[in-house]
Amino acid sequence: MWLPNTLMSRRHARRRTTHAARALLSVACLLALAHAARAKDSGGPPPSLALREKDVRRAEKVLEKLRRLDEAAARDDARGVRETADELYPGLFVTVSDMRPSDLKTDLDTAVFLYEEAVRTWLTTGGETADCGRERRGIYLTLCLDLGGGTRRQLLAAKARLHARFAEAVIRSFTGAGDAEMLRTLSAMKAARADDVVLAARVVETLKTLAELVDDFLTTDDEDGSRSVSRAAFDRLRGRFAEAVREAGALLAAMPRSPAFYSLSAAWRGFGEGLFWYQKVHHSKRLVVAAGGFDRDPLKDLRLDAEQVSHTVVASWDAAIKSTRVAERSLSLAAR
């Protein structure tokens, strides 16, 4: 009885893997189409940054909850951090997502994200020494150096604390406060925003490099106008493409959760997802001789059609290019 049961379990595992891969491919294609539609409809001016009273009240409640998490982190209380985070997340993300775009929402969203990341690293790699050389924002580099050999989780908590202070200053300004400390914090926040624009521009330039490489990858059929990926071009340029995807990801990781961040992230994900799926197609079309025979066809194992996957690749890259153009346009409008 053991052998039939083992075979059946393997068949079920393969079926689950196949179904999961098909679902992932469908989601990737739908996301690409959704990003393309959103990019087409979002070429206007950036949304209003005016604060609303209800957003300020929401922010005050979020900050109060983040203080509880920060107190547990300051005590290095792993159990307290985990239990508090279990109580507060994902509710904090939902609360912040309902706020109107503004500097307040940007800093609050970033603080919520960074505290959650600190919690996730608490029991894994959070105890490792922070690598200050990897910091792309000057304000984060200063925080890292001030820790003097602190851990990754300490740096994440320090970043979150900084953005929470920025959010508190915006709230105090909204309520009419005008003390020197608040004004200094607002000044630091505005300086950071100016640096963020430069960082976003660097992301745009990297994404434009990816768009140019995609133009080199794609060929158009003269008869039906359909597009496909040139294997020769991919072999020649995939190293540069993968490196540009990594660089854009590193730059995005340093950005606060602003509207520009989400727009640029959508483009970056599109380029990355297209690369992921094309590597599957590319591998399936090449006969690679391994030491013990032939490599297995990744698409055949997943019962996916190469033409269908190729369509998803092109859709992902088209959407990414459109999102990049929209982000560049939005940054230009914001700089006027």
Image: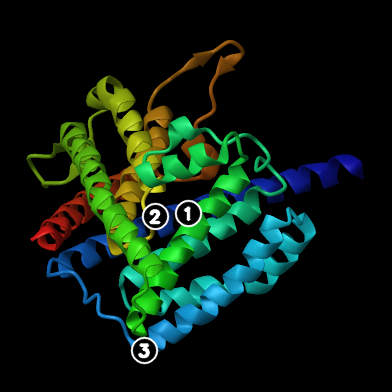
Residue 315: tell me if it is visible: no
Query: Which amino acid is tagged 3?
Result: Glu
Q: Secondary structure at mark 2?
A: helix
Q: Which residue is mark 1?
A: 24
Do callouts 1 and 2 mark residues in contact (Cβ within 8 Å)? Answer: yes
Q: How is the image coloured?
A: rainbow
Residue mark closest to the camera, 3 vs 1 = 3
176 vs 174, nearest the viewer:
176
- For marks 3 and 2, the one nearer the N-term is 2
Residue mark closest to the camera, 3 vs 2 = 3
Query: Which amino acid is tagged 1?
Result: Leu
Q: Residues within 10 Å of mark 2 (few under 14, many from 20)?
A: many
Q: Secondary structure at mark 3?
A: helix
Residue at position x 17%, y 70% from top? 41
232 vs 110, nearest the viewer:
110
Q: Which residue is mark 2?
A: 28
What is the x, y in percent for residue 246? 38, 35
**Mark sitting on residue 53:** 3
